[in-house]
Amino acid sequence: MNDNGNYSNTHTMKQLIYFALLIPFITFAQRNYLDEGNKLLSQNKNKEAEEIFKEALNSEKYNLIYQTQLGLSLINQKKYSEAEKQLEKVLSKDPNNTAALWYSGINNFQNAKNFRKAVMYFEKAYPFISKSSPQFFAVNFFIGKSYRNLLYTEGLTYEETSRMLETSKEYIRLQPSASDADQFISFIKYVEENRFPSNVKKWRVINENDPEELINKELERK
């Protein structure tokens, strides 16, 4: 992140994920497993963090905070299926758990195959994210970007295209000096000038590049 708080081209996906750690957590365990585990996560020692949170759950097996952070440690190891199962356990107990919804969105976005599911989770988290939190511009980024990837693959309905534009514009409003701002602005202009009318069931943009290759390249840059 640069001095203005905007993302640079080298800003990693992992740094976006860690915004979720700003959500206040409270624990009353004598040993501070949360601090230990989160410190390991910040050091990219994800396997060690996984072990810490599993140990914590041996002491407090119903602690949703430990369960959620365990999910994050699995995401960071690209254990996407395990992470999804872990986070689903949390959401079955607390459907509005903001951290679990956020991580579930990240999990599906990073998996590069489940952008529609990622949108579902990010939209569920959206009302619970403070507009003053860095996560707020991040959630708009992820929703807009997910829909953009879907536009190149599955196609979007008129309503989904509108939501893509809305979140993309909000991201630009909040991060006008971001390194990718011009790219977003150009894309928004293209969509507004070329989008299909509302009576068209789905609109898909055919890119000369292979969609999967395009998505993978975009993910690698983040």
Image: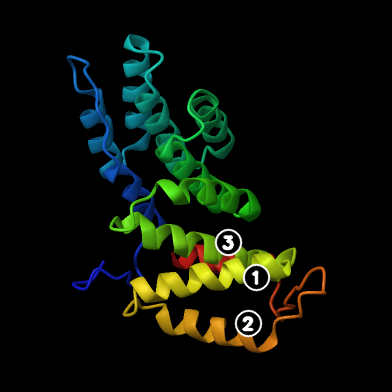
Tell me which numbered mark, 2 or 3, is placed earlier along the sequence: 3
Quadrant of the drawing holding the N terminus: bottom left
Furthest-top residue in view?
59
Disc 1 + disc 2, Cβ < 8 Å: yes
Q: Amino acid at mark 2?
A: Val
Quadrant of the drawing holding the C terminus: bottom left
> For mark 2, does the 10 Å Cα neighbourhood hold few (<14), some (14 to 19), or many (20 or more) residues?
some
Q: Nearer the viewer, mark 3 or mark 1?
A: 1
Tell me which numbered mark, 1 or 2, is placed earlier along the sequence: 1
Residue 179 seen in the current view? yes
- Name the residue that disc number 1 marks: 161
Question: Residue sitting at 34 percent across and 12 percent down?
Answer: 60
Q: Position of residue 165 (x, y in %)?
A: 56, 73
Q: Nearer the viewer, mark 2 or mark 3?
A: 2
Q: Amino acid at mark 3?
A: Ser
Q: CA distance from mark 3 to mark 1?
A: 11 Å
> Quarter of the image holding residue 31?
top left
- Name the residue that disc number 2 marks: 191
Q: Tell me if 187 is positioned left or right of 25 in this view.
A: right
Q: CA distance from mark 2 to mark 3?
A: 15 Å
Tell me which numbered mark, 3 or 1, is placed earlier along the sequence: 3
Q: Nearer the viewer, residue 128 or 105?
A: 128
Q: Tell me if 148 is positioned left or right of 3 in this view.
A: right
Q: Position of residue 210 (x, y in %)?
A: 71, 72
- Name the residue that disc number 3 marks: 146
Q: Amino acid at mark 1?
A: Thr
Q: Position of residue 217 (x, y in %)?
A: 55, 68
In terms of secondary structure, where does tag 2 sit? helix
In terms of secondary structure, where does tag 3 sit? helix
